[in-house]
Image (tube, grey):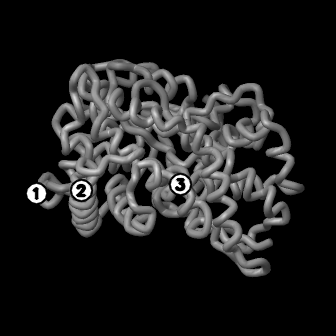
Amino acid sequence: MTETILPPYLTFEASSRRLRLDPHEPEFYQNPYEAYACLHAQGGVFFWKEFGRWCFGNYDDVSRLLRDRRFGRQNPAGIPDSLGVGQDRSHLAAFDAVEANSMLELEPPVHTRLRTLVNRAFVSRQVEKLRPRVEALANELIDRFEPGRPIDLLPAFAAPLPITIIAEMLGVPVDMGPQLLDWSHRMVAMYTLGRSRETEETANRAAREFSDFLRAYAAERRKNPGDDLLSLLLSAQEDGQKLNEDELVSSTILLLNAGHEATVHQTGNAVRSLLAQGGDPRRFFATPDAIPATVEECLRFDAPLHMFMRYAYEEIELADGVIVKPGEQVGLLLGMANHDPAAFTEPGKFMPERPDQKNVSFGAGIHFCIGAPLARLELQVALKVLFDRLPDLVLAEEPRVRDTWHFHGLEELKVRF
């Protein structure tokens, strides 16, 4: 550990490795990388008092723990609720019903069965074949821009592209896009530190409405199956087993929510990162090899998800005397790991050509993001089309980051050309 001048919004007790840092502190969530650099200098392992858990921000620790089967997503005591406001969950029945069958919150053998069924249906669509559709949609959205007038790229470009693609894949009406986004936003608000009773009730209503819609739509698809992911999920089998209706609803909600939420944030973050480099942005997409390299560096440089939680399934000693007991959670700081100076040369510098590209933005292990190939394709196509069409794009005003720290994204992204 080294002597480090800490930012005024955090305190760190080196002897006990106790961190005090309110994630709702604007100076932190606007630029968490300043705090991460200081915490790396202090060893990268700390007990974050506001969250009440040990957190790991070193790349090697995060990468290893994501794969460590002594940890998992499934709460041994039931539905994960580390950020809750009370013990009574009767008002969260619909939300909990969705979570109870979500592969993201389950472990083998149930997780293995669900992921195999969903992944088989997902892969059968052959994500690469979506490239022409993504390119056409990106161009259609840009065609609607008005030259000379400020445009907020988040609702005009970053949000409609992934929600349209995932809706088309699933066979859900595309004109339901705004409603799907609303349900998703209300549900993911459950994972923000310090949520209120109102947030919980709103999320539960969204889960109930979302589930009711999907049950009714699935009933129609059973009668009239099509060439879409929902029809494939209805028919997918593994060793004679199918998804039951509750699993189908949870899996579809997960695919819809995950299929756009992080991609919207990452698109906005990437555009801001690329514009900050100055010069002609088309240089980042000038060759076939440059395109995926640029997207991977965008994912590393300013990731959309900064914390991923895991439960300990046995008593485990980690990192020089840190002991976690069964049922306790640890926080894996993906955004901090992506800026570990021990893993990346000049981590604060945007370098698509870097040879040490190994970001953990999609996680690792059995919970590696099932939609990563789709997200990568959407980012590669959307960013290239945007800057090919609008190479003179500039910020109309400095963007601000939303107060939803571990879902790291912008409030708005106003540009002009």
Q: Nearer the viewer, mark 2 or mark 1?
A: 2
Q: Residue at x 24, y 64 (%)?
A: 209
Q: Which residue is mark 3?
A: 162
Q: Which residue is mark 2?
A: 211
Rounded to the nearest angstrom, the CA distance separating label 2 from label 3 is 21 Å
Q: Residue at x 39, y 24 (%)?
A: 322
Q: Nearer the viewer, mark 3 or mark 1?
A: 3
How many marks are shown on the rendered structure? 3
User: In what quadrant of the picture does the C terminus appear?
Assistant: bottom right
Counting residues from the start of the chain, the first of labels 2 and 1 encountered is 1
The answer to whether one can see residue 39 in this image is no
Question: Label 2 is placed on what type of residue?
Answer: Ser
Residue 185 in the image, given as x and y percentages of width and height: 39, 62
Q: Residue at x 24, y 47 (%)?
A: 222
- How crowded pointer 3 is (Cα within 10 Å; few <14, some 14-19, many 20+) is rated as many
Counting residues from the start of the chain, the first of labels 3 and 1 encountered is 1
Using the image, determine if residue 234 lies above or below residue 192. above
* Camera-nearest residue between 308 and 53: 308
Residue 316 in the image, given as x and y percentages of width and height: 32, 19
Residue 345 in the image, given as x and y percentages of width and height: 75, 30
Q: Which residue is mark 1?
A: 90
- How crowded pointer 1 is (Cα within 10 Å; few <14, some 14-19, many 20+) is rated as few
Question: Label 3 is placed on what type of residue?
Answer: Pro
Please tell me whether mark 1 sits on a helix, a strand or a loop. helix
